[in-house]
Amino acid sequence: MALFVAALLYPLTGLAMPVGPWRWDHEMGASTLAAVKVSLGLTTLALLIVIALGTPAAYYLARLSGLERAVFEGAIIVSVLMPPLALGLLLSLSFGPTSPLGAYLLRLGVATSNSPTSFVLTQVYVAMGYYVIAARAAFAAVPRELEMVAGLLGQRPLAVFARVTFPLARLGLAAAASIAWVRALGEFGAVIVTSYYPAGIPVRIWIDLQQAGLPAVMPLLLVFLVSALPLPWLIHMLAHRDGALDA
């Protein structure tokens, strides 16, 4: 297992590879800070939307069976399997000003391309399927008998969810939220089509790589890793700590 983990983490040694002196000046610092603010702020909003909309959908899927469940899960898997670049192009077309919905939103003053709205919308579409599939598995692992017993004891459905279902599913839900966070924060292919501006960290890395090469990219790459990894890692550790305390 130690060798397996070492092999998985081996790409991190790329941070120590010689690429020349890292470039970090006032201009680079300002663009990096702006990209970090965009990514962390808007990705947090996207994750909240994913959790708010995806959790009820995942719970509903976990309680379905037979053909109905297969149909709905198959449709969600299509969104996961869609290539990011193709998804970005489809979002630009279906929400763009030439579409009825896009034109209506534009009349309301909501820009659906190169705007914070398009940035969040793209991240929600990118991450939603991953969250729902992982959260559905977490809910499916909760024995229905326990929920039924709690209901027979007079607990309302929301109380059953809060006191029985959620505590038993929280480790899986934490993993689902972590996957959604990393998936949304790191998305490049779809975001660069729908929301080149405001530039998040992945798009900023690509711009710096094209304009100034690896020495200019390395500081932002390090910032990207520091921004992306701590939240899901912390969620994972807290969830497992709570599970160990319950045990």
Image (cartoon, rainbow, N blue to C red):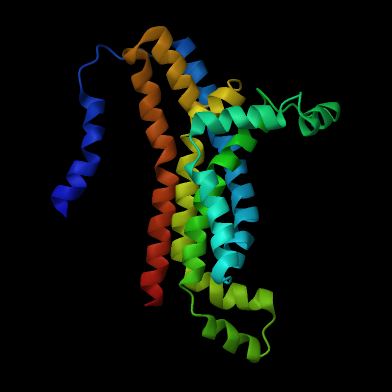
The residue depicted at 45 percent of the width and 48 percent of the height is 179
Number of marks in picture = 0
The residue depicted at 21 percent of the width and 48 percent of the height is 5
The residue depicted at 49 percent of the width and 28 percent of the height is 189
Q: Position of residue 247 (x, y in %)?
A: 36, 77
Asked if residue 173 lies left or right of residue 96, the reply is left
Q: Position of residue 83 (x, y in %)?
A: 48, 35
Q: Can residue 37 be seen at all in this image of the molecule?
A: no
Q: Can residue 50 be seen at all in this image of the molecule?
A: yes
Given residues 175 and 237, the one toward you in this image is 175
Q: Quadrant of residue 107?
A: top right
- Residue at the limit of the structure toward the bottom, as seen here: 153
Q: Position of residue 41 (x, y in %)?
A: 59, 36
- Residue at the limit of the structure toward the front, as seen here: 67
56 w.r.t. 143: above or below: above
Can you say which quadrant of the picture contains the N terminus? bottom left
- Residue at the limit of the structure toward the left, as seen here: 3
- Residue at the limit of the structure toward the right, as seen here: 107
141 w.r.t. 190: above or below: below
Q: Quadrant of residue 113?
A: top right
Given residues 102 and 236, the one toward you in this image is 102
